Image (cartoon, rainbow, N blue to C red):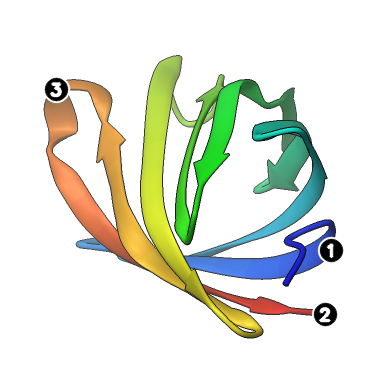
Amino acid sequence: MSVTGTWNLTVKAPTGAMETTLELREEGGQLSGSQSGQGDSSEIKEGRIDGDSLFWITTISRPMKMKLEFSGTVAGDAINGKVKAGMMGSYPFTASKA
């Protein structure tokens, strides 16, 4: 199954659910695309897929500048994983194909 397409992603942060839209393109084990939400948009960096495991990095500037490192597992039309939010810790996320 290809992960190419639009995904609705929700990070379960201590301050509440944060909704983003994830646009993924998969080609030869590499992921590219963008992630947007909360008035911010960022290109995906260092994206890769190996079997059902995914990894990508984005950056945000609101509410503060931060690097976000996503790692997860895809199963059908769902992705489950964790996002490392700089020094703020790691939080679970889920995504469903739009």
Q: Earlier in the sequence, mark 1 or mark 2?
A: 1
The residue that mark 2 highlights is 98
Number of numbered callouts drawn: 3
The residue singled out by tag 1 in the image is: 6
Does residue 17 appear in the picture of this structure? no
Q: Residue at x 33, y 61 (%)?
A: 81
Disc 3: CA contacts within 10 A as few (<14), some (14-19) or many (>=20): few
Q: Could you tell me which secondary element the residue under label 2 belongs to?
A: loop
Q: Picture coordinates of residue 10 (x, y %)?
A: 50, 69
Q: Quadrant of residue 84?
A: top left
Q: Earlier in the sequence, mark 1 or mark 3?
A: 1
**Which residue is denoted by mark 3 in the rendering?**
87
Of 86 and 3, the residue lying toward us: 3
**Above/below status of 65 relative to 60:** above
- Distance from disc 1 to disc 2, alpha carbons, whole Å, reads 6 Å
Mark 1 or mark 3, whichever is nearer to me: 1
- Residue type, label 3: Met
Residue type, mark 2 in image? Ala
Amino acid type at mark 1: Thr
Question: In the figure, is residue 33 to the left or right of 74?
Answer: right
